[in-house]
Image: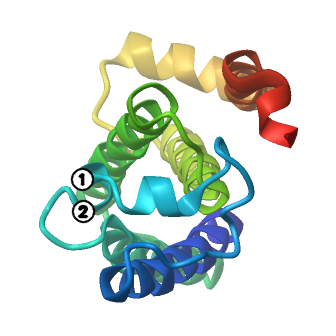
Amino acid sequence: MLVGALIGLVAAFVLSVDAVELAADPDAALSCNVNAVISCGTVGTSWQAGLFGFPNAFLGLIAESVVITVAVAGLAGVRFPRWFMTAAQTVYLLGFLFAYWLFYQSMFVIGALCPWCLTITVSTTLVFASMLHWNILEDNLYWPARLQAWAMSLVRSGAFGILTAAWFLLLAAGVLLKYGSALFA
C-alpha cells in the first residue's frame, strides 16, 4: 500500500505541475507529449481532467498523502478501528472507480493516453488491492460470514495476488489491443 501510494503521489505531483503549466499555456509542449496517442497535453486539456472545477491531480495529492500516513502508521504497529478501515476502503473504492472512469475516458473518448495518468491507474489499483487484501485478512469489512470466508480463502491460497496480476495484464493488453503500434509511432 505504501509503495503504491508513493508512486501515486509522485505521479499526482507531476500531473499537478503539468496542470498549472497547461492552465498558463494550453499549447505547452509537455515532456510526455510523445505522439498522437501518448499525449499528456491532449488528456490534460480535456474537460475530464478537471471534472470538479480544478485539476483532478490535486485530489491525488490529498488522497495519496492520507494513504501514505495510514500505511506508515500501520507499518509502525498502529491498529486502526474496524470502522476506520471500512471507511478507508469505501473512500478508496470511490477513488478507484474515478480512476477507471478517467482511464475509460482517456482510452475511448479522448483517444489519447497520458503515461502519468496510466501510472495513477496502476498505483490506485495497487493501493486498492493491497488495502482490500489487508482488510480481508483483518476481517474489517463487515461482510457476511460466507463472503468473508470466501475472500479469506482467496487471500490465503494466493489467488488474490494472481487475480490482481491478471488485472494488470488485462489493462496492458487492452491498451495494446486498442492502440497497437500507434503507441510507438
Q: Between 117 and 109, which is closer to the camera in this rendering?
A: 109
Q: Is residue 169 left or right of residue 107?
A: right
Q: Is residue 16 left or right of residue 127?
A: left
Residue 174 % position (x, y): 68, 20
Q: In the rendered image, is residue 128 in sight?
A: yes
Q: Quadrant of the C terminus?
A: top right
Taking depth in this image into account, of 24 and 99 the one nearest to the observer is 24
List the residue tagged with mark 1: 47
**22 and 54: which is toward the camera:** 22
85 relative to 76, above or below? above
The x, y position of residue 161, in whole percent, is: 76, 32
Q: Quadrant of the N terminus?
A: bottom right
Question: Residue 87's quadrant in the figure?
Answer: bottom left
Q: Callout 2 environment at 10 Å: few (<14), some (14 to 19), or many (20+)?
A: some
Distance of mark 1 from mark 2, alpha carbons? 6 Å
Query: Type of residue at label 2?
Result: Gly
Q: Position of residue 58 (x, y in %)?
A: 33, 77
- In the picture of the structure, the residue carrying the numbered disc 2 is 50
Which one is nearer the viewer's eye here, 134 or 116?
A: 116
Marks 1/2 in contact by CB < 8 Å: the verdict is yes
Q: Check disc 2 and report its element: helix, strand or loop.
A: helix
Quadrant in the picture for residue 49? bottom left
- The residue sitting at 30% across, 18% down in the picture is 144
Judge whether residue 78 can be spotted in this image. Answer: no
**Looking at the image, which residue is at 67% across and 28% down?**
171
Q: Is residue 130 left or right of residue 87?
A: right
Question: Callout 1, which amino acid?
Answer: Trp
